Image (cartoon, rainbow, N blue to C red):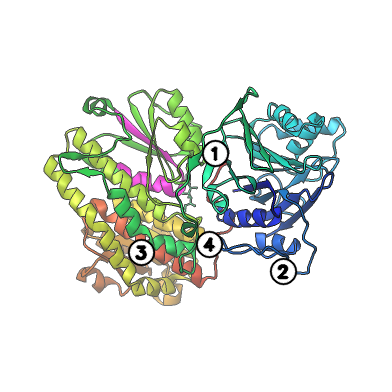
Amino acid sequence: MCGIVAFTGTIDAVDVLLGGLRRLEYRGYDSAGVALVPRANELICVRRKGKVAQLAAALGRETAAPGREAPVAPTSSSAPAPAGTTGIGHTRWATHGVPSEANAHPHRDCSGKLAVVHNGIIENHTALRAELVAAGHTFASQTDTEVAAHLIEHYYQGNLAEAVRQALQRLSGSFALAAVHAAHPDRIVVTRNDAPLVLGSCAYGALAASDTPALLEHTRDVIYLGDRDLAVLHADGRVECYDPAGSHYVPTQVRVEWSLEQAERGGYPDFMLKEIHEQPRVLRDTISGRFAVENPGLVFEELPFSDRDFANLDRIQVIACGTSYHAGLIGRNLIEAWARLPVDVEVASEFRYRDPIVTPRTLVIAISQSGETADTLEAVKLARRAGAFVVGLTNVVGSRITLEANAVIYIKANLEVAVAATKSFLGQVAMLTLLALHLGYHRGFLSTAQVSEIYADIQKLPAQIEEILADTTAIERCAEACKDAQTVLFIGRGVGATTCYEGALKLKEISYLHAEAFSAGEIKHGPIALIDPDGLDDPTKATPVVVVAAQSATYDKTLANIEEVIARGARVVALATAGDKRIAELTERVISIPPVRECLSPILASVPLQLFARAIACARGCDVDQPRNLAKSVTVE
Ligand code: AGP
């Protein structure tokens, strides 16, 4: 997803912009650029297809890795470094127009004096472009963003903030914008609607960015701008904020406690592995403080519900996308089992375009690690309009979902940099597990003793994950046996099937290997045809089938499914409970997890599947932190 950085101040803007762009790389992008005002009435624009490193080289700079000081002086003689203390930078994730230098941001107006960077989608860009072309404006790109540059130019009469304010009234859609003008070398104007933008100021200037990590090196006190508010960043560090009516207001600053080190890899070869290894900590933090000895129900102060309110609910609707959707599927099993409340789980992109049945007696749980997913946010708005109480489950403080939901439950994953969600998924599943216990207790279906017993088992999970992480030899061996396959199938039953859905998504998103998950009971209704019978004679042609076969009520049936696929020539990788001799007789490729209660098994079983996907992706030479075509925050539909 596109990333914006803007800086005006008293130090070199190039280093600040490149440093910020590096910290936004996790969002995924295909080109990068900056516009700088080196002196009054001059604007320089440098853009490159590819990575920030290529942009830095074009600027005669090298970028430092996040967390290290960026070099102050040019280190390459490939091009002169433009001077200047004011500029805007951007990483683009293509939506309108192919990834190319011409479509890369910043985009300029006809005069070449005004430049704009943008994240989101301007929905009425076609009509505006036609109007501006008719008025004599010349466009140089296929992007919706360029419309904003020309529209601001159209209204500009010497006051940049006023021109942006007027242009803003004509724009519909979701967007965050930063505009700079050669005539104003000491200021930047920013605005946003339904897209993230964080502001801050420091001793040497004022900044804005799409996400907090890009500001942390300079300030810990940030400002979250409201929808359609406008702010002027001044080189002396002032940030002037205006509401949509144009009234000036003093913004509230929020202190961010995340350390810069949290954005670094911490000695691991990639963020994904670091984040997988953080999961025991995430679980401990999630569990901590949720159980009160004197009150055997769990502590969910975020939920303003009495027992009567809980009893009055007639169903739960979970809305989410991707990995968060899979967490929702696991949550459904637990809530239905423990709280005896029907739960529907739906991908937000479908939910919002149906005419779903949502009433004031529906509890809606919207899950989004980023809190910025456009489809999920729109589904939340729809549910609220229908009178439902919406609980947002997210990882990001101050994200959009926290503003749209009635109540917010934060998972404790902390900053997740790798595009593939791992620790945030585990945090979501753990929090949904606790929530299911809470609902079960308050609706009278779980006794104090049952809550205490399950909670005691949840407390064992962090150490059990550490056990899995301590020896990954079997996982790597299984990955080696599957890395060259055309397709990998995942099968399981009950919560095992939901674990498989996430395992298959993880594999396909980071290794680009086709993977598909099925309920094991369904394979004979179609998917079993995917198993190549040549695998019976030639092991190199055997189709890999990953089977989640931990101890469960359906264990025997899963075993039968293993035999079924082996009989058709499959190469089975089994995820089984440690010490399982029956599985060992069927396949030599076994990944073990510690014994665990069936309802909690997805929390353990997901970890080896994350490592399995990563090992295959690494063996195939893929960039596991920034997989192609994907973004960390999907802020457009
Ligand atoms: C996760 O690995 C994926 N990158 C993706 O499916 C993600 O879960 C999805 O886009 C939803 O994101 P959210 O949780 O931030 O809403």
Q: Nearer the viewer, mark 1 or mark 3?
A: 1
Q: Nearer the viewer, mark 1 or mark 4?
A: 1
Q: Secondary structure at mark 3?
A: helix
Identify which residue, 603 or 401, lies in the foreground.
Answer: 401
Quarter in which the C terminus is drawn: top right
Kindly indicate the quadrant of the structure image that contains residue 136.
Answer: top right
| Amino acid type at image mark 3 | Pro
Q: How far, Cα to Cα, is label 1 from label 4?
A: 38 Å
Q: Secondary structure at mark 4?
A: loop
Q: How far, Cα to Cα, is label 2 from label 1?
A: 34 Å
Of the numbered discs in the image, which one, if any, rests on residue 75? 2
Of the numbered discs in the image, which one, if any, rests on residue 223? 1
Mark 2: give few (<14), some (14-19) or many (20+) Cα within 10 Å. Answer: some
Up-down relation of residue 233 to residue 608 (above or below): above
Precedes in sequence: disc 1 or disc 3: 1
Precedes in sequence: disc 4 or disc 3: 4
Of the numbered discs in the image, which one, if any, rests on residue 512? 4
Mark 4: give few (<14), some (14-19) or many (20+) Cα within 10 Å. Answer: some
Precedes in sequence: disc 2 or disc 4: 2
Identify which residue, 183 or 1, lies in the foreground.
Answer: 183
